[in-house]
Image (cartoon, rainbow, N blue to C red):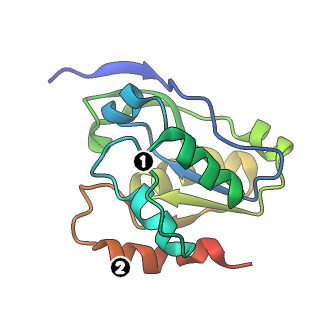
């Protein structure tokens, strides 16, 4: 499969009261097709977030997902703004242009920044942390490729989102 140069197709999701920023690496093919973050049906992101916050409703539609994020003051975006990538493979990412997060950070009172997985962490540390001077906490990836982590184990690790 040949790599493609892709510019991030999604706008950041945040509001003026967002306090938590979660950054992925770059949207998967399924996410790009769906038009909202963590769109691959096997990604466990939307399954574990309700567990963390004690909610039982499934977050299946974009509207339900947006409402959940708003309720919990969570912002979403990705560390990479554009890159060459083969399909959805983080391992294939080359020629990275990092996302400029300064607008989100000036528009919203972001208290904590988290990265979803090691690729996002690596890119954040390399490109973003030196510019912003802010560290990010790495959480285990919710990707189906991270099969070693059960949904329950992921939810336990991700509970840090609820810390004051």
Q: Is residue 19 left or right of residue 153?
A: right
Seen at 48% across and 62% down, the residue is 57
Residue at 77% of width from left, 44% of height from top? 15
Image coordinates of residue 67 in percent, x first then y, are 63, 49
Residue 44 vs residue 85, the one in the foreground: 44
What residue lies at 39% left-to-right and 73% top-to-bottom? Answer: 154
Residue position for label 1: 60
Q: Position of residue 58 (x, y in %)?
A: 43, 58
Q: Residues within 10 Å of mark 1 (few under 14, many from 20)?
A: few
Labels 2 & 1 near each other (Cβ < 8 A): no
Q: Which sits earlier in the primary sequence, circle 2 or circle 1?
A: 1
Q: Quick check: 139 above or below 78?
A: below
The alpha-carbon separation of the residues under discs 2 and 1 comes to 22 Å
Q: Residue furthest left?
A: 1
- Secondary structure of residue under mark 2: helix
Compare residues 88 and 60 and report the one nearer the observer.
60
Which residue lies at the image location 39% right of the left edge and 41% below the top edge? 39
Q: Position of residue 66 (x, y in %)?
A: 60, 45
Query: Residue 10's spot in the image, x, y percent?
Result: 54, 28
Q: Quadrant of the C terminus?
A: bottom right
Residue beneath disc 2: 153
Q: Is residue 52 above or below residue 82?
A: below
């Amino acid at each position: 499969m040949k790599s493609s140069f892709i510019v991030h197709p999604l706008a950041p999701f945040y509001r003026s009261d967002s306090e938590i920023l979660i950054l992925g690496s770059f949207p998967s093919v399924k996410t790009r097709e769906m038009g909202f973050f963590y769109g691959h049906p096997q990604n466990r992101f939307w399954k574990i977030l309700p567990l963390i916050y004690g909610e039982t409703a499934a977050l299946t539609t974009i509207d339900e997902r947006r409402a959940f994020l708003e309720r919990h003051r969570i912002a979403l975006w990705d560390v990479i703004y554009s890159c060459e990538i083969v399909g959805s493979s983080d391992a294939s990412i080359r020629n990275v242009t990092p996302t400029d997060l300064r607008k989100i950070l000036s528009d919203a009172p972001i208290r904590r920044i988290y990265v979803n997985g090691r690729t996002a962490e690596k890119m954040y540390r390399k490109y973003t942390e030196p510019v912003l001077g802010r560290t990010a906490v790495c959480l285990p990836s919710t990707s189906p490729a991270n099969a070693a982590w059960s949904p329950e184990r992921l939810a336990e690790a991700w509970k840090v989102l609820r810390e004051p």
